[in-house]
Image (cartoon, grey):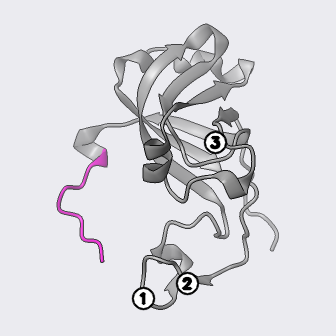
């Protein structure tokens, strides 16, 4: 398929996992393993960190660049039977975009570094975006899940 649009990576994510096979299966497992992740922004995007320190949490969007992109039905371990890609959180999908809500640990804006709670990706994963988390907008306490 021809792409409909382009994505600009704004930096890279640094985690302890060097290979995809080493990565935890999800962000909860990553946080159980301990440590933190570092979001490193390219110099041109560093001014975008201005006033981020006012927030306790961010939404981190990242590109799972080693994920399969042509799998539409999967058999997840946690579910009975097959599931369509849009009903699960697997990185194998047409656009392998992952996201996590993470607490900010520290910010070094002049160096383009944001330290956050651990993430479930390999070291060097492309960073797509950072957005402030708003509990009044982003939380849905009565959301239904199977």
Image marks 2 and 1: residues in contact by CB distance under 8 Å = no
Quick check: 90 above or below 105? below
| Figure quadrant of the C terminus | bottom left
According to the image, label 2 marks what residue?
75
Where is residue 125? Give x, y as percent: 70, 43
Is 128 displayed left or right of 34 in the figure? right
In magenta stretch: residue 145: yes
Q: Earlier in the sequence, mark 2 or mark 1?
A: 2
According to the image, label 1 marks what residue?
80
According to the image, label 3 marks what residue?
128
Q: Earlier in the sequence, mark 2 or mark 3?
A: 2
In magenta stretch: residue 94: no
In 3D space, how far apart are the residues under numbered discs 2 and 1 (Cα atoms)? Answer: 8 Å
Where is residue 112? Give x, y as percent: 63, 17
Q: Which residues are magenta?
A: 138-146
| Figure quadrant of the N terminus | bottom right
In 3D space, how far apart are the residues under numbered discs 2 and 3 (Cα atoms)? Answer: 28 Å
Quick check: 18 above or below 54? below
């Amino acid at each position: 398929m021809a792409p409909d649009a382009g994505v600009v990576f704004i930096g890279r994510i640094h985690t302890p996992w060097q290979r995809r096979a080493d990565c935890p299966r999800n962000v909860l497992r990553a946080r159980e393993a301990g440590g933190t992740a570092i979001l490193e922004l390219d110099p041109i995007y560093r001014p975008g960190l201005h006033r981020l320190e006012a927030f306790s949490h961010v939404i981190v969007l990242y590109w799972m660049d080693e994920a399969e992109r042509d799998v539409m039905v999967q058999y997840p371990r946690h579910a009975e039977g097959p599931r369509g890609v849009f009903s699960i959180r697997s990185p194998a999908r047409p656009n392998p975009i992952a996201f996590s809500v993470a607490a900010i640990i520290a910010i070094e804006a002049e160096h383009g570094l944001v330290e956050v709670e651990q993430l479930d990706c390999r070291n060097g994963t492309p960073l797509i975006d950072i957005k402030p988390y708003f509990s009044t907008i982003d939380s849905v306490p009565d959301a239904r899940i199977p």
